[in-house]
Image (cartoon, rainbow, N blue to C red):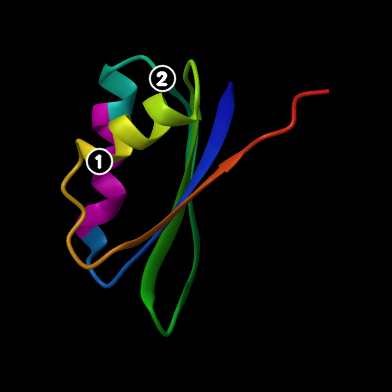
Amino acid sequence: MRFMVFVRSPDVAAARHAEALLRAGVLLDAGDLVPDACGVSGYWLIDVRDHEEALERVKRIALPACVVEIRQVAVV
């Protein structure tokens, strides 16, 4: 299953956490979004077994003061 993980953080370091997902072999794509008043925003597209694994993978990464949203991607 594919999931889009949106990350908003006041810290630029949050964008570097995609490396951990890449090493785990689940990262399909990553990118930055236009910065806003909340700071740095980006996304990760990951391919994992289920929603629980997506949560587990994101929880392993220390993301202080971040807002994270995980949404399943519909594959047609």
Crowd band around label 2 with a 10 angstrom C-alpha radius: few (<14), some (14–19), many (20+)? some
The mark that comes first in sequence, 1 or 2, is: 2
**Residue that numbered label 1 is attached to:** 59
- SS assignment for the magenta stretch, majority: helix
Q: Nearer the viewer, mark 1 or mark 2?
A: 1
Residue type indicated by callout 1: Lys
Q: Nearer the viewer, residue 75 or 18?
A: 75
Q: Mark 2: which secondary structure?
A: loop
Q: Nearer the viewer, residue 1 or 41?
A: 1
Residue type indicated by callout 2: Val
Name the residue at 32% across, 27% down.
Answer: 21
Name the residue at 20% across, 41% down.
Answer: 61
Q: Nearer the viewer, residue 5 or 15?
A: 5
User: What residue range appears in magenta?
Assistant: 13-20
**Drawn side of residue 51 relative to residue 20, left or right:** right
Quick check: is 23 in the magenta stretch? no
Name the residue at 47% across, 19% down.
Answer: 48
Q: Mark 1: which secondary structure?
A: helix
Crowd band around label 1 with a 10 angstrom C-alpha radius: few (<14), some (14–19), many (20+)? few
**Residue that numbered label 2 is attached to:** 26
